[in-house]
């Protein structure tokens, strides 16, 4: 992939990985559009990143996606890179929670359905443009779950599977299908985690994670697993019970609370 001269949509670009991607892509002479649900956060990014285009849009809302598409097709018809990055993560005690059915599966709406809906809506536009790509941001936890975040990990495993299928279905097009599976990365996503949940976890700095993504993206590496994510993938293939047990240790503390 060329990493300059693109028109790029990054969902969830108002913090963390999406923000860092926007910053780096802007430096490399790309047109960058980011989305998020919070106007204040979007305005702050607009003040910080010169040239970024911000649009308030919720990936779990089909009307928002339609409006986003209409605006981009009209104002930025050269869109050729789509980065499905928006995501949320919750720890859920499956034996003891007060979540409504909708709250219990909110991560499916945002992380999984959001990605599928956005791809479905934007694919015709991507197919019209050269050097096109869609990227799903899954997780190292797509390969083995962190048991205290059961729905989140299920969404990421599903995104991994969906990306494999999408890649096969788009082989007869010029749209490349990438999957970025980040390891635990220092962002707001995990700011509510307890220290005990992150014991034995090394957080990757977000700039290093995004640098690894850009290198993989530039070299057409379709599954990009930076840092510990590639270890999780390896362990899940060759030592699945061992690694599941390791990542299930925080369940004991969850039950104790
Ligand atoms: N950090 C990690 O350890 C890690 C590891 C593996 C994978 N990932 C994945 O990386 C992606 C980015 O996460 P991050 O770590 O950068 O977390 P983050 O700092 O919390 O960023 C998440 C971004 O998504 C946006 N967002 C959330 N729900 C949205 C929705 N319904 N519609 C549109 N935007 C939405 C947030 O903005 P608003 O809340 O304002 O909408 C924010 O801009 C996620 O898919 C996450 O699962 C992260």
Image (cartoon, helix red, strand yellow):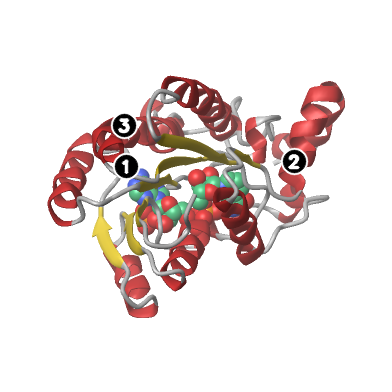
Q: Nearer the viewer, residue 122 or 60?
A: 122
Q: Residues within 10 Å of mark 1 (few under 14, many from 20)?
A: many
Instruction: Say whether disc 1 or disc 2 marks the residue closer to the N-terminus.
Output: 1
Image point (30%, 40%), residue name: 126
Image point (61%, 36%), residue name: 149
Q: Nearer the viewer, residue 233 or 104?
A: 233
Q: Is residue 253 visible?
A: no
Q: Position of residue 185 (x, y in %)?
A: 64, 55
Q: CA distance from mark 1 to mark 2?
A: 28 Å
Quarter of the figure with the C terminus: top right
Q: Are marks 1 and 3 in contact (CB under 8 Å)?
A: yes
Q: CA distance from mark 3 to mark 2?
A: 28 Å
Asked if the beta carbon under badge 1 is closer than 8 A to the nearest atom of ligand 1, the reply is yes
Q: Residues within 10 Å of mark 3 (few under 14, many from 20)?
A: some
Say whether residue 91 is left or right of residue 194.
left
Residue 59: numbered disc: 1
Q: Is residue 120 visible?
A: yes
Image point (32%, 66%), residue name: 42
Secondary structure at badge 3 equals helix
Q: Position of residue 122 (x, y in %)?
A: 27, 38
Secondary structure at badge 2 equals helix
Residue 71: numbered disc: none
Q: Position of residue 231 (x, y in %)?
A: 79, 40
Residue underneath mark 2: 230
Q: Are marks 3 and 2 in contact (CB under 8 Å)?
A: no
Instruction: Say whether disc 1 or disc 3 marks the residue closer to the N-terminus.
Output: 1
Q: Nearer the viewer, residue 88 or 70?
A: 70
Asked if the beta carbon under badge 3 is closer than 8 A to the nearest atom of ligand 1, the reply is no
Q: Position of residue 255 (x, y in %)?
A: 72, 34
Residue underneath mark 3: 117
């Amino acid at each position: 992939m060329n990493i300059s001269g693109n028109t790029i949509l990054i969902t969830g670009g108002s913090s963390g990985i999406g923000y860092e991607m926007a910053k780096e892509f802007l430096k490399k002479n790309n047109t960058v559009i980011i989305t998020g649900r919070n106007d204040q956060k979007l305005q702050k990014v607009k003040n910080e990143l010169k040239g970024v285009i911000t649009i308030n849009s919720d990936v779990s809302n089909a009307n928002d996606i339609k409006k986003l598409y209409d605006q981009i097709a009209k104002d930025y018809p050269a869109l050729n890179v789509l980065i499905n990055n928006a995501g949320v993560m919750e720890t859920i005690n499956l034996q003891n929670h007060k979540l409504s059915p909708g709250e219990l599966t909110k991560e499916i709406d945002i992380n999984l359905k959001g990605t599928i809906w956005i791809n479905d809506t934007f694919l015709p536009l991507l197919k019209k443009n050269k050097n096109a790509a869609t990227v799903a941001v899954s997780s190292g936890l797509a390969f083995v779950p962190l048991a205290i975040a059961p729905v989140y990990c299920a969404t990421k495993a599903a995104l991994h599977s969906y990306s494999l299928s999408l890649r096969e279905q788009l082989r007869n097009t010029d749209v490349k299908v990438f999957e970025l599976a980040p390891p635990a990365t220092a962002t707001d996503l995990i700011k509510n985690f307890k220290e005990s949940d992150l014991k034995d976890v090394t957080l990757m700095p977000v700039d290093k994670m995004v640098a690894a993504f850009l290198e993989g993206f530039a070299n057409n590496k379709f599954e990009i697993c930076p840092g510990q994510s590639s270890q999780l993938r390896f362990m899940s293939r060759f030592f699945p019970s061992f690694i599941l047990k390791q990542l299930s240790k925080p369940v004991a503390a969850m039950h104790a609370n």
